[in-house]
Image: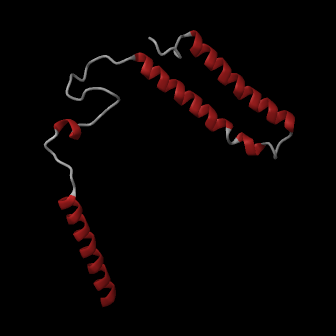
Amino acid sequence: MITMLNIFILIMMISNIMMMLSIILSKKSFSDREKSSPFECGFDPKSSARIPFSLHFFLITIIFLIFDVEIALILPIIPLFKMVNFILWTKIIFFFIIILIVGLYHEWNQNMLNWTN
């Protein structure tokens, strides 16, 4: 029991010494306000929080999430290939691919994929 206590105290001392050394030897200076401010998606944190942002950036994020969910639904279907017959597996994959193509076509018609806006 005493040896366990001695080991615990030794570990605590070593960890405290390492933390103190890292604080002393770190080159981080707190005088630079720009470096210590948070960076959020290219917005200036010192300006007004009520400025409008590009809706196109938001739409690209939604497109990514939709396609990411679709891929997450397709990936578990791959092991299903060995469990079900080929015709059923092909119909399932075809259904998801059609959804992706129709979604991509709709986004293309809405000019959501055009970065020059």
Identity of the residue drawn at 53% across and 11% down: 111
Q: Is residue 88 above or below residue 108?
A: below
Identity of the residue drawn at 81% across and 32% down: 90
Q: Furthest-left residue in view?
A: 31
Q: Position of residue 59 (x, y in %)?
A: 47, 20
Asked which quadrant contains residue 102, the reply is top right
Is 109 left or right of 77, judged from the image as shown?
left
Is 32 left or right of 18, judged from the image as shown?
left
Q: Position of residue 22 (x, y in %)?
A: 23, 61
Q: Is residue 23 visible?
A: yes
Q: Quadrant of the C terminus?
A: top left
Identity of the residue drawn at 43% across and 21% down: 57
Q: Is residue 24 above or below residue 60?
A: below
Q: Nearer the viewer, residue 5 or 14?
A: 14
Q: How is the image coloured?
A: secondary structure
Q: Is residue 113 above or below residue 31?
A: above
Is 53 left or right of 97, judged from the image as shown?
left
Q: Quadrant of the N terminus?
A: bottom left
Q: Nearer the viewer, residue 88 or 113?
A: 113
Identity of the residue drawn at 49% across and 23% down: 60
Number of marks in the image? 0
Q: Is residue 1 visible?
A: no
Q: Position of residue 39 (x, y in %)?
A: 29, 34
Asked which quadrant contains residue 47, the reply is top left
Q: Position of residue 95 (x, y in %)?
A: 74, 26
